[in-house]
Amino acid sequence: MSQYLSGAQTRRIGGLVDIYPEPRVEIHPRLAEQHGIADTDWVTVTSRRSRVTLRASVVKTIRPDTVFIPYHWPDSKSANKLTHRTLDPRSKIPEFKVSACRIERAEGPPREAEHPEAR
């Protein structure tokens, strides 16, 4: 919530960045329980296109069948690398809204060697 829209404005406000300095993957408590995930655990989200590993935020404000990752974080934290590159034919806006994915509890943050684009 502290990083609204694209983060272009909010990530320039130190207090908001202090609250959420990194993206989190939001997961409903029922889904988290099914996968053995607790709040602040590391979680790997994998789609057919790529994967990202982030900390979990277990929240009741999301649908039980959905995970959410803010899209505006760059590099190895980018949710956009999980999604399809299709453009809307009229507006030419990327289809960054939905993608089927798999989640699993991770042992820790990704190593830089696994994600060379993070350098």
Image (cartoon, helix red, strand yellow):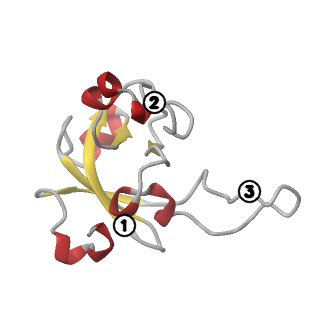
Query: Upstream in the sequence, badge 3 or badge 2?
Result: 2
38 lies left or right of 57: left
Mark 3–mark 1 Cα distance, whole angstroms, equals 22 Å
The residue drawn where x is 31% and y is 31% is: 17
Instruction: Residue 32 in the image: state x and y as whole percent.
Output: 28, 41
Nearest the viewer among 82 and 93 is: 93
Instruction: Residue 20 in the image: state x and y as whole percent.
Output: 30, 32
107 lies left or right of 7: left
Nearest the viewer among 72 and 9 is: 9
Q: Amino acid at mark 2?
A: Thr
The mark closer to the camera, 3 or 1, is: 3
The residue drawn where x is 38% and y is 63% is: 75
Q: Secondary structure at mark 2?
A: helix
Q: Which mark is residue 10?
A: 2
The residue drawn where x is 34% and y is 63% is: 76
Q: Which mark is residue 93?
A: 3
Q: For mark 1, what is the residue? A: 51
